[in-house]
Image (cartoon, rainbow, N blue to C red):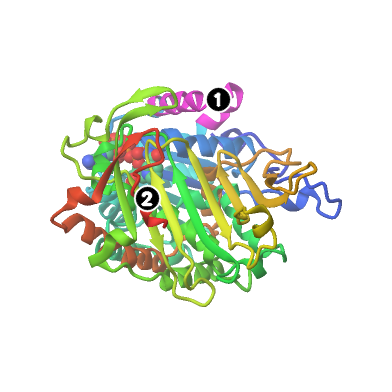
Amino acid sequence: MDNTDTMAKRNSPAVVGPKSPDPDISSESCLMEGIADPGMIVIVGASGDLTARKIVPALFSLYLNNGLSDSFLVVGCARTRLSDREFREKMRNALKTAGILDDRKWQIFSRSLYYRRVDYGELASFQSLADSLKELNKKHGTEWNRVFYLAIPPSLYKSAAEMIGKAGLSTENREGNGWARIVVEKPFGRDLDTAIDLDRSLHKHFKEHQIFRIDHYLAKETVQNILMFRFANAIFEPLWNRRYIDSVSITAAETLGVEHRAGYYEQAGVLRDMFQNHMMQLLALTAMDPPSQFEADRVRDEKVKVYRAIRPFPISRLQDHLVLGQYGAGTVEGKRVPAYRDEQGVDPQSLTPTFATMKIFMDNWRWQGVPFFLTSGKRLAEKRTEIVIRFKEVPHSMFRQTLGEQITPNRLILGIYPDEKISITFQTKNPGPRVCLRPVTMDFNYNQDHTGPLPDAYEKVLLDVMLGDHMLFWRQDGVELCWAFLTPVLKGCETCVDRAEILFPYESGTWGPKAVGDLKK
Ligand code: NDP
């Protein structure tokens, strides 16, 4: 098979950006950054959930949007015995489930899908994978560009990365083509020591520029928009500090329970699952200073400064800064759901937290004294992700005596899910003869005036890996600083004698334990 029948020739560039109503900004300038180099993406753990639900649908979607090179291959590998045909069938079903199967396009795309069996700790099987990849490279003209995507349990990252390296698959050509990259999914370790250890193992065979630590949250359009909103509009930044802001609340609420991931979640809990990565990224984007340029390392430098400024929690008074909860039975979206401890695979005595609210302070000039409330939990009342900036009250209200009313402070809401929007609430006069105040909301919906497709977060990160752009990926210093903050907190929670007493039960379908109210006082 030659290149021409690997994938259909696609000459037009992918249109994924907004069509601007402003005639000065052509939609051409918002096109996808580029088309990926010829190359192969080798998914290690391809028999699993992430591959079927996220990685392959994202690759197919990129293909449909002309984001992939014509010479592009996907090679799945895992211990399960599957033929190429069986793997293709499994992936076809996955696309059908995702609702994006286009049979005509699939016929062409699927010719670029292969499957090879590997044993994650066995060098011989990676050497035979290397031989296979070289053959496929010759056949498809992928210029020996390789992405290794580790879609396996985190306990296997070290051995798989080492086997890839020992089999000679991590070596890059000096001339610039023939690149090799490795993608690691969160969690990056389970505390500071294991994160450092994992990093050492990755660096045995890969250099930092070859390592991509994925946090797909960062690739969500509305999350990326936080920086544009803050630093491309002159009116907000002067207010974005302790003088005008009273508090910031960052919430990532889920209605789902632990689902089929109890094995992982029992070991992780909400702090490792959500706070060490997604919540910390949202915090950094909200609190960081503007970088001098929109460039990967400058942006990541500013994020790292935020993590350095987080004030450590006094471990003896954790309850002043942290509320942990675990869901009980309840009703979510009209359906009765079981308690966490009754979920399949969960220890009936489990003390794993499924909810947390943290009150964080930062020791720097911009944020001194402003509390940041970070909340995430499972089985909550709604699936919602948002950042709420609560401004201070007016310094003096001329209405207070006349109206006897408290003036509600202004709020700016950066909605990430389900409404991708920006809202500002402010006070106006209630229409009518009496003088009364009325809070109103001004909304900007992210999709307003947008006509093109919006890329899914996994599409964006996969494309960036292939383009070698690190902007939306964690850098190791950020990972370590976040663990340096969280590890003592986790130890404090996991080793304290009255562990059960610091874990508050909450009914599924509510907004979490009542104790959160005390933290916010
Ligand atoms: P799975 O649990 O589905 O595992 C992937 C594959 O790894 C399995 O198909 C299996 O393949 C192999 N495997 C699983 N357990 C073991 C084991 N104990 N020993 C050896 N091999 C094993 O993982 P996911 O696909 O859900 O996730 C992959 C990675 O991505 C994980 O690190 C996860 O934390 C991360 N992640 C996943 C998300 C998701 O939505 N699924 C979201 C964000 C991150 P085989 O037996 O064929 O070798």
Figure quadrant, ligand 1: top left
**Amino acid identity at mark 1:** Leu
Which residue is more in the foreground, 458 or 420? Answer: 420
Label 2 or label 1, whichever lies nearer to me, is: 2
Residue 375 vertical placement versus 328 (above, below): below
Instruction: Identify the residue at image location x=68%, y=52%.
Output: 426
Which residue is more in the foreground, 316 or 437? Answer: 437
Q: Are marks 2 and 1 in contact (CB under 8 Å)?
A: no
For the stretch drawn in magenta, the main secondary structure is helix
The residue under label 2 is 516
Say few, some or many: other residues with alpha carbon within 10 Å of mark 1 (under 14 / 14 to 19 / 20 or more): some
Instruction: Identify the residue at image location x=42%, y=73%.
Output: 308
Q: If the image is split into quadrants, where does the C terminus sit?
A: bottom left
- The secondary structure type at the circle numbered 1 is loop
Name the side, left or right, on which 433 lies relative to 213.
right
Name the side, left or right, on which 237 lies relative to 164.
right
Residue 313, x across and y down, in percent: 32, 67
Say few, some or many: other residues with alpha carbon within 10 Å of mark 2 (under 14 / 14 to 19 / 20 or more): many
Residue 311 vertical placement versus 168 (above, below): below
Residue 498 vertical placement versus 445 (above, below): below
Which residue is more in the foreground, 482 or 75? Answer: 482
Q: Residue 108: within the magenta?
A: yes
Residue 500, x across and y down, in percent: 18, 48
The residue under label 1 is 101
**Amino acid identity at mark 2:** Val
Residue lying furthest left? 497
The answer, for residue 263, to whether it is visible in the render is yes
- The secondary structure type at the circle numbered 2 is helix
Residue 37, x across and y down, in percent: 58, 51
Instruction: Identify the residue at image location x=40%, y=36%.
Output: 510
Magenta segment, which residues? 86-110
